[in-house]
Structure formats: C-alpha cells, structure tokens
Image (cartoon, rainbow, N blue to C red):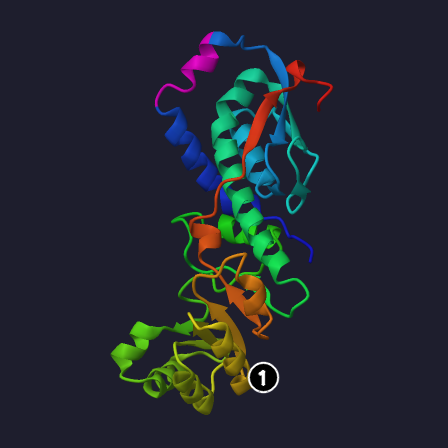
C-alpha cells in the first residue's frame, strides 16, 4: 500500500502552536546567546531503538518554520523500518534554527513513529490472516489526523475519523434506545445513503439480533477467541466483523486466526510508547553517519 503524504495545511497549524508554546515571548534565549547567528551546522536524526518511522514532513515543518533555510533530507522515509544506529534524516542549515526547532520536531517525530511502530507490531502478528489492523477515535486531542496517518505508516488502516463519517451504535446507545433493534432502526431511518452502520455487540444473542435486522459491520467487543469463531461463523459474510477489546501483540495472532475482518485497538494512538530518536551533531560523528 502506497503511503500518501499529508498536505502541509493539515499539520502546519499544529506545528505552529507547538513552536509558540516552546518559544514563548522571547524565543530561544539559550541558542541565541551561545551560537553565532551565521553559524551553519549539519545534524542527523538517528534511531536509538528498532521501530517504524512516521512524521518526517512534520519534523521538517518545525525546522523550516523556525528558519526556512533549514533543509531536511530523508534517508529512511515514513513507513521505513529502522534499527538502532540507522540515520533517518540529515538536517542542514543555520545552527540556531536547528537547535530551536529540535524539541518540537522530535516530539512529533518520536510520538508518531511510536504509533507506527506499535501498529506494525499488530500487523506483524496478524500476517498471513485476512485481518486488517485499524485504529479508533481514542486519539490525542488535536492530533487525530497525524496519529491516524502514523497508523497507516505502520501498515494499519483507519476506522472512522469522527462522529460524522459513519454510525457506530455502542452499548450506551442501545441502552438508551431500549434494545438493539430499536437502535438500528432509528439509525437506519436517519442515515444517508452513503453512511455505513456498525453495531457493537457483547454477546452472540445481540449479534443474532443485529444480523436479523441487517447492518454493515458488527463490533465484537471483548469476546473470547471461541466466541469470535462462533461470531464469524454466524455472520457468514453478511457484515464486516471487527474484534475489539484489550488486544495486544501477544493476543492478536489468535484473534486474527478466528477469521475476523478487522482488529481494532485504541492503545495504538492513545498510549503507544514514543520511539527513541536522537538528533546528533554530525561534526562529532561523521563516520558513524
């Protein structure tokens, strides 16, 4: 699958906000005091642990908003697997700009690469099955577009982006409607002809009700592996099947083997660990680069 880059206007406002938070009212008083204004430098972004890269365009944006003369050349583009010591990118330009943009660039790059790395771990676990790995709406406020891009960089796919692009009938919707049938019928009466309807079910009995009425997809929430096998058999291709609930890289393989179409995991975006990436002064370690 080709990874389509994000358009700059989709992330530039976020980067501007992050830089403003860091630079405050007086700018980088440390770099301005220590580094001559005309000093040029070369640095490398280097992986310090295994992972998958995501967010290089966002990192480039951070540096170039500080100083447009900064150039970032990718050596391992987004979606690339890296091991410790790999040079991800070379950054050259005014030294003050490099130092001032460093933390903001690394914050975005390390976080998004962490999301991509976590996603790749589940994709690897499900390899050889038909299951696709998808994210959820459990994203960092304001960063959904970037985090969902990082999921794609890790080989995963995206669930809905918000409340307005698909209907997902969850347990509280069902409780307030009174039952599964009523919730689905109300959703169907309101949905446009292009809007998909998915319903979350906790039991095989609820699944049976949903299938009898007809939906586009069923979210099989916190079911055991055996229940998932039964659910896939019951569904028989009538709807897309999605397994969800506390899924890890250790459990994903057995879940994927049940025949579900999708495996969704909120932790990919809300609590994946940042990938350790360093920014090293190239003049001190040219041969290693």
Quarter of the image with the N terminus in it: bottom right
Quarter of the image with the C terminus in it: top right
Residue 144 visible somewhere in the drawing: no
The magenta span reads 25-33
**Which of the pair 253/268 is nearer the observer?**
253
Per the image, label 1 sits on a secondary structure element best described as loop
Residue 137 visible somewhere in the drawing: yes
Provide residue 91's location: percent of width, then percent of height. Answer: 63, 26
Q: Which residue is drawn at the image coordinates 60% and 22% (left, top)?
A: 280
Q: Which residue is drawn at the image coordinates 50% and 59% (left, top)?
A: 135
**Which of the pair 240/24 is nearer the observer?**
240
Q: Is residue 77 above or below residue 242?
A: above
Crowding around mark 1 (Cα neighbors within 10 Å: few <14, some 14 to 19, many 20+) is: few
220 inside magenta stretch: no
**Which of the pair 224/236 is nearer the observer?**
224
Q: Which residue is mark 1?
A: 237
Q: Is residue 13 above or below residue 106?
A: below
Q: Is residue 8 above or below residue 144?
A: above
Provide residue 175's location: percent of width, then percent of height. Answer: 27, 78
The residue sitting at the right extreme is 287
The residue sitting at the bottom extreme is 212
Q: Which residue is drawn at the image coordinates 42% and 62% (left, top)?
A: 162
Provide residue 141's location: percent of width, then percent of height. Answer: 38, 49
Q: Which residue is drawn at the image coordinates 48% and 28% (left, top)?
A: 103
Provide residue 73's location: percent of width, then percent of height. Answer: 68, 32
């Amino acid at each position: 699958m080709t990874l389509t880059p994000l358009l700059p206007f989709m992330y530039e406002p976020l980067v501007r906000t992050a830089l403003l938070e860091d630079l405050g009212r007086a700018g980088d008083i440390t770099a301005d005091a220590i580094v001559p204004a005309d000093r040029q430098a070369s640095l490398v972004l280097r992986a310090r642990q295994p992972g998958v890269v995501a967010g290089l365009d966002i990192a480039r944006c951070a540096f170039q908003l500080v100083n447009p003369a900064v150039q970032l050349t990718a050596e391992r583009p987004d979606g690339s697997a890296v091991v410790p010591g790999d040079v991800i990118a070379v950054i050259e330009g005014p030294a003050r700009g490099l130092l001032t943009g460093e933390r903001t660039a690394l914050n975005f790059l390390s976080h998004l690469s962490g999301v991509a790395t976590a996603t790749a771990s589940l994709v690897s676990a499900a390899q050889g099955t038909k299951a696709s790995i998808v994210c959820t709406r459990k994203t960092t406020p304001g960063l959904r577009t970037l985090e969902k891009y990082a999921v794609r960089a890790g080989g995963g796919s995206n669930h809905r982006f918000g409340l307005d692009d698909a209907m997902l009938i969850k347990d509280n919707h069902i409780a307030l409607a009174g039952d599964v049938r009523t919730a689905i019928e109300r959703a169907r009466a309101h949905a446009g002809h292009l809007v998909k309807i998915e319903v979350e079910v906790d039991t095989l009995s609820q699944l049976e009700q949903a299938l009898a009425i007809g939906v586009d997809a069923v979210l099989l929430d916190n079911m055991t592996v055996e229940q998932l096998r039964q659910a896939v058999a019951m569904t028989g291709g009538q709807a897309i099947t999605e397994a969800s609930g506390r899924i890890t890289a250790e459990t994903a393989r057995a879940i994927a083997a049940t025949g579900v179409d999708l495996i969704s995991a909120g932790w990919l975006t809300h609590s994946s660990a940042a990938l350790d990436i360093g920014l090293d002064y190239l003049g001190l370690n040219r041969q290693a680069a």
